[in-house]
């Protein structure tokens, strides 16, 4: 209490603590995205050497043996061109998704992978083989945008608005259209990202950023 007998609110985090927390989150984000993309490129190199033999381990729609591909598909790509197209947005959106903590990011990634993969397996034409990390790209987009809405912290809201403005055009990829493109993976990845933001939401803190 203060001199007048009124309760005094607990002290908030200092500006230094907030900056240190953001820097720590940024460093962890860089490390985890470097490892993730490095793994994808390493797998694609092996796949190239093996003449595309690894692609068979992707998602095979509506086939029981294709279910394990839900976990493997994000690390498999239809050539280096496919991987390069995914790498830049994955790096940027993944970095922003992971900046609040690696643990939370890993849970969000798992939710996106499972929701996106299950959606592909259930709704793609029977026997269709799907590979690629684009479900994660759409998932991280949905996660970063929705996190600002659910957490209601200033930095998360700002990041969500920036990502929505810069990447809104990718939403067209979640609609049926171009042959050979898994719009199902895009759509369910987006749904998985929003779901992850809701499941992993945190209460806003008064002094948080």
Image (spheres, rainbow, N blue to C red):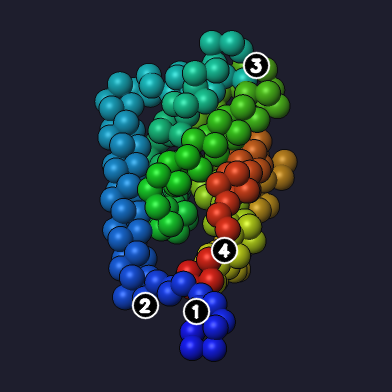
The residue that appears at 49% across and 22% down in the rendered structure is 69
The residue that appears at 52% across and 25% down in the rendered structure is 70
In this rendering, the answer to whether 52 lies above or below 1 is: above
Mark 4 or mark 3, whichever is nearer to me: 4
Residue 54 seen in the current view? yes
The residue that appears at 36% across and 65% down in the rendered structure is 22
Question: Helix, strand, or loop for circle 1?
Answer: loop
Mark 1 vs 2, N-terminal side: 1
Mark 4 vs 3, N-terminal side: 3
Q: Which residue is mark 1?
A: 1
Give coordinates of residue 151: x percent, y percent.
58, 60
Q: Residues within 10 Å of mark 2 (few under 14, many from 20)?
A: few
The residue that appears at 47% across and 26% down in the rendered structure is 71
Q: Are marks 3 and 2 in contact (CB under 8 Å)?
A: no
Question: Helix, strand, or loop for circle 2?
Answer: helix
Q: CA distance from mark 3 to mark 1?
A: 64 Å
Question: Helix, strand, or loop for circle 4?
Answer: loop
Mark 3 vs 2, N-terminal side: 2
Please give the label number shown on residue 170.
Answer: none
Q: Are marks 3 and 1 in contact (CB under 8 Å)?
A: no
Please give the label number shown on residue 62.
Answer: 3
Q: Which residue is mark 4?
A: 204
Mark 3 or mark 2, whichever is nearer to me: 2
Q: CA distance from mark 2 to mark 4?
A: 17 Å
Q: CA distance from mark 4 to mark 3?
A: 41 Å
Mark 3 or mark 1, whichever is nearer to me: 1
Please give the label number shown on residue 15.
Answer: 2
Mark 4 or mark 1, whichever is nearer to me: 1
Q: Residues within 10 Å of mark 3 (few under 14, many from 20)?
A: some
């Amino acid at each position: 209490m203060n001199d007048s007998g009124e309760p005094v609110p607990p002290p908030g985090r200092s500006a230094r603590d907030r900056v240190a927390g953001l820097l720590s989150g940024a460093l962890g984000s860089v490390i985890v995205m470097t490892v993730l993309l490095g793994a994808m490129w390493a797998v694609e190199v092996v796949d190239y050497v093996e003449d595309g033999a690894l692609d068979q381990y992707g998602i095979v729609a509506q086939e029981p043996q294709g279910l394990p591909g839900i976990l493997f598909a994000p690390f498999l790509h239809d050539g280096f061109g496919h991987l390069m197209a995914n790498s830049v947005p994955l790096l940027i959106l993944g970095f922003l998704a992971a900046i609040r903590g690696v643990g939370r990011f890993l849970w969000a990634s798992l939710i996106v992978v499972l929701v996106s993969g299950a959606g592909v397996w259930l709704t793609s034409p029977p026997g269709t083989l799907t590979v690629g990390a684009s479900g994660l790209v759409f998932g991280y987009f949905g996660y970063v945008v929705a996190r600002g809405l659910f957490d209601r912290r200033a930095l998360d809201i700002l990041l969500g608005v920036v990502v929505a403005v810069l990447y809104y055009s990718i939403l067209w990829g979640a609609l049926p259209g171009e042959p050979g493109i898994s719009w199902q993976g895009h759509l369910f990845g987006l749904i998985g990202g929003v779901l992850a933001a809701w499941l992993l939401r945190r209460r806003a803190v008064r002094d948080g950023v």
